[in-house]
Amino acid sequence: MPELPEVETVMRGLMPSMQGSVIARAQVNRPDLRWPFPEHFAERLTGKRVERMWRRSKYILAELSSAETLLIHLGMSGRMLVSGDPLGNFVHEHPATEKHDHVVLDFDNGARVTFNDPRRFGAMDLLDTATQEQHKLLAGIGPEPLGNQFDESHLIAALKGRKMPMKSALLDQKIIAGLGNIYVCETLYRGKIHPARRACDVTENEVRALVPIIREVLSEAIEAGGSSLKDFRQADGELGYFQHSFDVYGRDGETCKAPECGTQIARIVQSGRSSFFCPSCQS
Ligand SMILES: [Zn+2]
């Protein structure tokens, strides 16, 4: 499932084709994904210019000239493909439509953006731009970890007295936006905190130390995603899934990367999801 860095990478990959361009044609091939598409979806997109693109948590937002904003959520398996890229030196012909190409947007600059999602856990919606942050998907989300509102005092206050395990606390989107299983595991490893430790038992100093760690873990992944964008035009035009090496995620049974540790990375299941950690480095 894409997390914040993957979504940021997809958005950055879409921007050259979408931002400032007009949707010349919108093809909507089914009535719904996870939820029904908005009424007259294709008509409301057609002829509108994408004024500005940004990301909130794991949602991509494209503000249109019609005072509506197109919300894109990749869900579990959603993929965005760009073809006919006007800026690329490696122009792809538009590929033949595939079975799970649910929404196809053709821009006036010749670019085509296709949303493909075999499992249909993704979503697209249109929001009033003026009130978009009150939309049910966006209201109540905690601060962006890379934004100014996320800081030590916020995290200390949010975790104070909470009996839930640290793993669950950092996954809670009301506490912090956009973190998922992978980057929470990586954050707790660097913070030397056991994923099952109760949030209320983590010291203020340890919580303070997590703020720059979270930023670092996400920024490194976004950087890796950025380098993948340089290559994607030469590949198949699919955005957002890049090679990235993790310290603990998916490494159970392998040796901890900390110098002179030598312990095997362990895996436990918490709330139905795998947590990877070093039993020696994290307590
Ligand atoms: Zn270790």
Image (tube, rainbow, N blue to C red):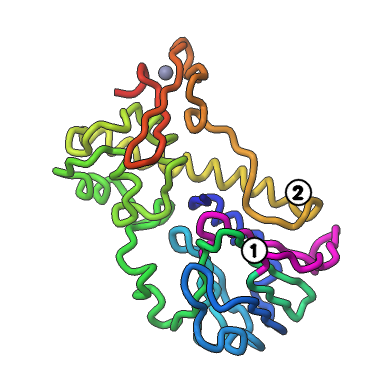
* Circle 2 SS class: helix
The residue labelled by disc 2 is: 231
Q: Name the amino acid type tagged 1.
A: Asn
* Nearest the eye: 45 or 42: 42
**Figure check: 21 above or below 263:** below
Alpha-carbon span between mark 1 and mark 2: 20 Å
Image mark for residue 95: none
Nearer the observer, disc 1 or disc 2? 1
Q: Amino acid at mark 2?
A: Asp
**Image point 25% across, 31% down: which residue?**
197
Residue 99 in the magenta stretch? The answer is: yes
Magenta stretch holds residue 16: no
Q: Is residue 106 left or right of residue 278?
A: right
Quadrant of residue 193 in the image? top left
Which residue is at 56% across, 59% downward?
119
**Residue at the spot 68% in from the left edge and 80% down from the top edge:** 27
Q: Is residue 17 left or right of residue 159?
A: right
- The picture places residue 162, in percent across and down from the top left corner, at 17, 44
| Disc 1, SS | strand
User: Image quadrant for the C terminus?
Assistant: top left
* Marks 1,2: beta carbons within 8 A: no
Magenta residues, start to end: 73-101
Please state which of residues 87 and 85 is positioned toward the viewer in this rendering: 85
x, y percent for residue 270: 33, 37
Main secondary-structure element of the magenta-colored stretch: loop
Q: Is the CB–ligand 1 distance for label 1 below 8 Å?
A: no
State whether label 2 is within 8 Å of ligand 1. Answer: no
In the image, taking residue 173 as reference, residue 90 lies left or right, namely right
Which residue of the protein is positioned furthest toward the left in this rendering?
161
Q: Check disc 1 and report the residue beneath it.
A: 116
